[in-house]
Image (cartoon, grey):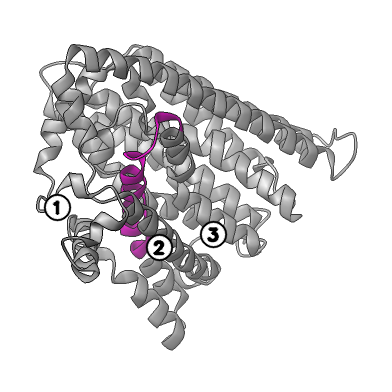
Amino acid sequence: MGSTNNLRMLGFNSKLEMKSSSVKSMIELQDDSRAIPVSTTRNLSSLKGGPELFGTSSAWSIMKASIKTAFFSDKINLLLPCGPLAMLVDQLAHRPGWVFMLSLLGIIPLAERLGWATEQLVFYTVPTVGGLLNATFGNATELIISLFAMKQGMLRLVQQSLLGSILSNMLLVLGCALFCGGIAHHNKEQMFNRSNAGMNVGLLLMAVMALIFPTVLHVTSTELQIGTSVLSLSRFCSCIMLVAYVIYIFFLLTNQKQDYASLKEDSPTASSDIEESANISKWESIIWLGLLTLFISVLSEYLVNAIEGASVAMDVPVAFISVILLPIVGNAAEHASAIMFAVKDKLDVSLGVAIGSSTQISMFVMPICVVVGWITGRPMDLDFEPFETATLFMTVLVVAFMLQEGTSNYFKGLMLMLCYMIVAASFFVHADPASIQDKPQ
């Protein structure tokens, strides 16, 4: 859940991995992003953090400037009141349907601002630390919601919400981006880096493999030890996936560091402009990062507690809410960002937002949840049931075929969106055998 600022950074944001092969396009992005309101009254030389912040102005004026920069620079923050409204409705009216929708809407701007705070902090770190920060907080909202659901023992909700985020990014977000980009540039075929797309698809296929084997082992009843073999295999696969993802991040950072060094030699002025784009100080970034994580955690608890009641109130399956509704709203900021850059013919960046996020969830967030469940004694595994696993497998195959040529047009985007409609309809009529609410009639 990003903003335009993060797209100007070279070698930091793991959700935009595909930009590593097109450093020159990042120079163009800084011109596009200057239209975004920023705090121009604050001198960057005074944003180092520490005592000099208080030499020329009071703490109150600094606080007001920081709040203005954080919450009054983006129209998406108009949804912020939905969070307190969700808490109020829960306390006074006990309407789980309304609590769910309001808390879901309230999380959207908080998630976008969390990504913004992470990007601001990355400006004050070395590339390795910056990459790790973005790998950790890139999909922090999904991770926080999953951890709260795991705490409540709702392991199927964890599985389905993560699966839904992957499907939403790969089919809906990417499909809309390709469709809008194709319409805006209907007189030509848009091009993107095929090798980077292939690398991400390869990681996604690895994630599918890690899901298929535990599922098949359980369905065919061929476990060596009933009830423990699937769990043990899931934990082993999760550790392997985390190792693969760490190596992948290291590979990206190494390549991007070389690109960045060559860029500084070729165009020192341009690279300097990219570096000097932080809007707040290091300590402000850290404080906002902590506060926004806390706000999302509080709102996530209301969201998780209201899901089953919302399923009954709206008369829709829990699986549909978890796989379709939750990710669509949760990925709203990414959705808008991917479309915007596809329309501007920055297709590598759009693919980085959509496919990069799917890769991060499948190779980092999902195995982290399994490992956390292992540590806390929760039997979180990678047995996603045959229906969900088959859906993910087919999705990765469809996207792989769409991206293999390195070209895009509006028809490819339309096909991906139609595929997502088929997936959504399937989950609307799907009775999850592991859910208490979704029993076949």
7, above or below 106, in the image: above
352 or 38: which is nearer to us? 38
* Residue 58 location, quadrant: bottom left
Q: Earlier in the sequence, mark 1 or mark 3?
A: 1
348, above or below 284, in the image: above
Residue at mark 1 to residue at mark 3: CA–CA distance: 48 Å
201, above or below 179, in the image: above
Please tell me which residue is depicted at 26% across the width and 44% down the height of the picture: 3
- In the image, 186: left or right of 171? left
Circle 1: residue type: Arg
Q: How many numbered discs, if any?
A: 3
Of circles 3 and 2, the one toward us is: 2
CB-based contact (under 8 Å), mark 1 and mark 3: no
Q: Which residues are magenta?
A: 104-128
Residue bearing mark 1: 42
Our reading of the magenta stretch's main secondary structure is: helix
Q: Earlier in the sequence, mark 2 or mark 1?
A: 1
Residue 266 on image: x %, y % = 19, 12
- In the image, 230: left or right of 322? right
Residue 331 on image: x %, y % = 36, 47
Residue bearing mark 2: 291
Query: Dot 3: few (<14), some (14–19), or many (≥20) neighbours within 10 Å?
Result: many
Residue bearing mark 3: 318
107 or 163: which is nearer to us? 107
Of circles 2 and 1, the one toward us is: 1
Residue 30 on image: x %, y % = 16, 32
* Residue 91 location, quadrant: bottom left
Please tell me which residue is depicted at 41% across the width and 77% down the height of the picture: 87
